[in-house]
Image (cartoon, grey):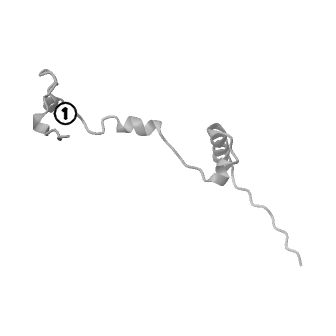
Amino acid sequence: MKKENKQELEDDLRPEYDLKSLLKSGIRGKYAHRFQKGTNIVLLEPDVASVFPNGEAVNEALRLVIQLRKLPKTRQSRTVRA
């Protein structure tokens, strides 16, 4: 079986679809920012993932941690035993 030469291939693209002009006006990364906003994937370690049944449970726990961090810190009195 003979390999086809790239030059021997016939171009089936219509003349009105000029790829050279289409590709020159393209903007690299045009939608990258929008894509990044919608994706924020975090991989959990297996021991942590086994505690949470789904993503919503993880989010709920993290929201609770955020709320706990906002609470004012109180000093606990320590009793010294002699």
In the depicted structure, whether residue 75 falls above or below residue 38: below
Q: Secondary structure at mark 1?
A: helix
On the rendered image, what quadrant is the C terminus found in? bottom right
In the foreground, 24 or 11? 11
Which quadrant of the figure has residue 67?
Answer: top right
In the foreground, 78 or 62? 62
The residue depicted at 11 percent of the width and 22 percent of the height is 15
The residue depicted at 62 percent of the width and 39 percent of the height is 55
Q: Amino acid at mark 1?
A: Leu
In the depicted structure, whether residue 73 falls above or below residue 2: below
On the rendered image, what quadrant is the N terminus found in? top left
The picture places residue 50, in percent across and down from the top left corner, at: 68, 48
The residue depicted at 16 percent of the width and 34 percent of the height is 24
> Mark 1 highlights which residue?
23
The picture places residue 28, in percent across and down from the top left corner, at: 26, 39
Which quadrant of the figure has residue 75?
Answer: bottom right
Report the residue that reaches farthest toward the front: 1
